[in-house]
Image (tube, rainbow, N blue to C red):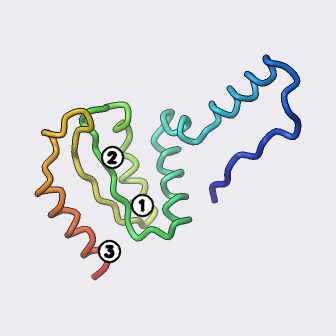
Amino acid sequence: MIFPRELPDERPKNREEACRLLADWLLSRPNYQTFYHPTFQTAMMSAVARQWKAGGIILHLNRGCEGVSIGVMENRLGLMKEGFKVMTYEGNMADEREFDLHSTMARLEIFLQVLNP
């Protein structure tokens, strides 16, 4: 299970100690670790999906931000290996004209039918 990080036992004594604690806390956040390798993101997604008892996972392939989309297909394969049903759809957060609503809705309807036969 994923739990929130605990607060330090004592308040920082000075500005430098406060900055070090804050930097350590921010750099150890799971969100940042997911940029290093897709397996970290897959593990986090799997843990969250199991905690929420998700029947399936939908992943966005964002053509507008390559940084966000790095490793998404590897995540898909990893989640499928763990037994999750996974659907992907394409879009562009920077340009809504690159989103096919009709096709995405059709894929979503089929995916939901697979989840709830």
Name the kind of residue labelled 1 in the image.
Lys
Distance from Cα at disc 2 to Cα at disc 3: 20 Å
Q: Is residue 38 above or below residue 85?
A: above
- Residue drawn at (63%, 30%) of the image: 27
**How many neighbours does mark 2 have within 10 angstroms: few (below 14), some (14-19), or many (20 or more)?**
some
Residue visible at 53% across and 58% down? 48
List the residue tagged with mark 2: 73
**In the shown orientation, is residue 113 left or right of residue 2?**
left
* Residue sitting at x 79%, y 17%: 16
Is residue 109 toward the left or the right of residue 5 in the image? Answer: left
Q: Secondary structure at mark 3?
A: helix
User: Which one is closest to the eye, mark 1 or mark 3?
Assistant: 3
User: Of helix, strand and loop, which one carries label 2?
Assistant: helix
Quarter placement of the N terminus: bottom right
Dot 1 lies on which element?
helix
Q: Earlier in the sequence, mark 2 or mark 1?
A: 2
**Corner quadrant of residue 25:** top right
Q: Which residue is mark 1?
A: 81
Mark 3, residue position: 115
Looking at the image, is 76 positioned above or below residue 31?
below
